[in-house]
Image (cartoon, grey):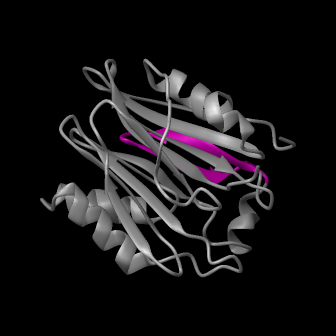
Amino acid sequence: MYVGRFLVVGSNENGYYVAYRVSSRSFPNRVAKIFKNKISIVPKEGHEEEIFKNPYISYNCIRIVDDVAVVSNGSHTDIIAEKIESGMNMKDAMTLALLVFDYEKDEYNTPRIAGVINNKKGYIGIVTKDFIRIEKIKPMKSYYIAVYKHNVPKEVKFEAKNAKEAVDFILNKGIFKKFTHPVTAAAAFKKEKWEMYARCLNAEN
C-alpha cells in the first residue's frame, strides 16, 4: 500500500515523540540529516538538481523549540516552530501554518500534514484541497496521518523507548511495514532531554 509521506505524534511511559517517514516513488534519492535542533530532508549527494524538478522535496521535517517537537512534510515545519518560539500556542501555530501554506500545488494536490507535542498536550493535522482537520492527541496514545489514502488522523500502536526505536518502528513495524516505497525516516524523542535519530534506506527501496 502506497500512502506517501506520513508522520506519527504521541507519548508513552517512556516519553513523548514525533516520527516522520518519506515514502516516495518519484524522488527516492533523499536522506534525513540531523542538525542542531532539527532534522532536514535533502537530496542525496549527486542528486541535488532534483530540487529544481520539484520544490517540495527538500525541507526541515522536525524542529525542536524548547519542550515542543514540530513535525511536518514540508516547509511549514519552520513556520510552526517560529510561531511557537514567538509565543503562539501550539494549536494556533499549526492551524495558521496549514491554512496559510494550504495543500501543495503539485500534480497530485498533495496534502500538507503536521504535528506538535510537548509533555502536556499534542495536536495532529492536515490540509487538503477539500478540507482542513486538526485533532488533539490523547495522553499515552499515538496517532498517524499520511498524505494519501490514510489522510485522517488514526490512533495506532507505536512501540518505542527512544528515537532510534521510533525510526525503526515507523520504517518497518506494526501497520507501517505494509506501507511501500520507504526512503528515509527521522524521529525526536524526549524523556529527560531531546534526542534525535535518522536513517536512510537504499535508493532502490
Q: Give percent across and percent down for residue 38.
A: 41, 44
76 above or below 164? below
Quadrant that contains the C terminus: top right
- Is 40 situated left or right of 87 in this image? right
Residue 78, quarter of picture: bottom left
Give the residue at x 22% y 56%: 90
Residue 140, image x, y percentages: 31, 30
Q: Is residue 174 above or below residue 61?
A: above
**The one of 149 and 115 positioned closer to us in this rendering:** 149
Task: Provide the major secondary structure of the magenta segment.
Answer: strand
The answer to whether 84 appears left or right of 204 in the picture is: left
Q: Is residue 49 above or below residue 42?
A: below
Q: How many marks?
A: 0
Q: Which residues lie in the magenta part?
A: 29-46
| Quarter assignment of residue 58 | bottom right
Q: Residue furthest right?
A: 204
Residue 167 in the magenta stretch? The answer is no
Residue 126 image offset from top left, x and y in percent: 45, 65
Residue 16 seen anywhere in this rendered image of the structure: no
- Identify which residue, 150 or 78, lies in the foreground: 150
Query: Which residue is depicted at the point 51% across and 47% down?
Result: 7
Relative vertical location of residue 13 with respect to residue 117 in this rendering, above or below: above
Where does the image place residue 122, in percent across and percent down from the top left? 28, 46
Viewer-closest of 179 and 32: 179
Residue ID at (80%, 37%): 202
69 sits left or right of 147 in the view? left
- Residue at 22 percent of width and 65 percent of height: 92
Q: Can residue 101 be seen in this view?
A: yes
